[in-house]
């Protein structure tokens, strides 16, 4: 058992969404640098050395977990990534793509039973019963929003500082 952060990429680690152009990935606007907030996430997670990351991003579906991991500029974040929510999913990939994001996360949780978990995402669909476990970012701001960063910091303390408890 382990502690997990479910990490979306678009609208979290950078503003907007990335677009695929041939073999390249580019940001949705010329003034946006992909992974511009990776250092923010790195700093937020530094007090939690045992917290692992599971990718809950469409990036891992489109590009695969390994290519997505390698695209993230922070070596410390890359080291934390243990997989993606699609790992071990047994249904048709088309079914996966239409599941709400929260249901994708909850499916992973039911299959892998992490000790404690939290998600950071710009999508809220499927998290209705677990809002307290979601740090919601606005797509066009991501982790560039200081209020979201402070909420994230508080949720990390709430979920991962205290002794582990049995939680659903």
Image: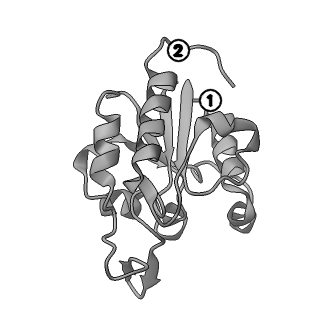
Q: Position of residue 18 (x, y in %)?
A: 45, 74
Residue at 50%, 55% in the rendered image? 8
**Residue 111 appearing in the image:** no
- Residue with the mark numbered 2: 164
Figure label count: 2
The image quadrant of residue 33 is: bottom left
Task: Please identify, in this view, whether the residue under mark 2 or under mark 1 is nearer the observer.
Answer: 2
**Residue 154 appearing in the image:** yes
Q: Position of residue 61 (x, y in %)?
A: 55, 64
Numbered disc 1: secondary structure: loop
Q: Tell me the quadrant of the picture where the C terminus can be found.
A: top right
- Residue with the mark numbered 1: 113
Residue at 39%, 57% in the rendered image? 13
Vertical arrangement, residue 32 with respect to residue 148, above or below: below
User: How dense is the environment of label 1, judged by Cα within 10 Å: few (below 14), some, or many (20 and up)?
Assistant: some
Residue at 35%, 45% in the rendered image? 41
Residue at 25%, 58% in the rendered image? 73
In this rendering, would 155 be left or right of 81?
right
User: How dense is the environment of label 2, judged by Cα within 10 Å: few (below 14), some, or many (20 and up)?
Assistant: few
Which residue is at the front of the view, 110 or 57? 57
Which residue is at the front of the view, 168 or 154? 154
Which residue is at the front of the view, 84 or 120? 120
Label 2 close to label 1 by CB (< 8 Å): no
C-alpha distance separating marks 2 and 1: 13 Å
Q: Position of residue 37 (x, y in %)?
A: 33, 56
The image quadrant of residue 21 is: bottom left
Badge number at residue 18: none
Numbered disc 2: secondary structure: loop
């Amino acid at each position: 058992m382990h502690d997990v952060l479910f990490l979306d990429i678009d609208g979290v680690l950078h503003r907007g969404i990335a677009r695929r152009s041939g073999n390249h990935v580019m940001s949705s606007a010329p003034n946006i640098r992909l992974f511009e907030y990776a250092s923010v996430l790195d700093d937020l997670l530094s007090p939690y050395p045992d917290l692992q990351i599971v990718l809950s991003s469409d990036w891992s579906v489109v590009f695969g977990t390994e290519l997505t991991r390698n695209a993230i500029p922070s070596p410390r974040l890359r080291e934390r990534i243990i997989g993606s929510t699609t790992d071990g999913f047994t249904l048709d990939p088309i079914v996966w793509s239409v599941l709400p994001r929260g249901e994708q996360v909850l499916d992973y949780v039911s299959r892998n039973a992490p000790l404690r978990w939290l998600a950071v995402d710009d999508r809220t669909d499927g998290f209705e019963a677990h809002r307290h476990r979601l740090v919601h970012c606005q797509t066009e701001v991501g982790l560039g929003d200081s209020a979201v960063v402070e909420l994230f910091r508080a949720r990390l303390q709430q979920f991962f500082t205290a002794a582990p408890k049995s939680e659903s």
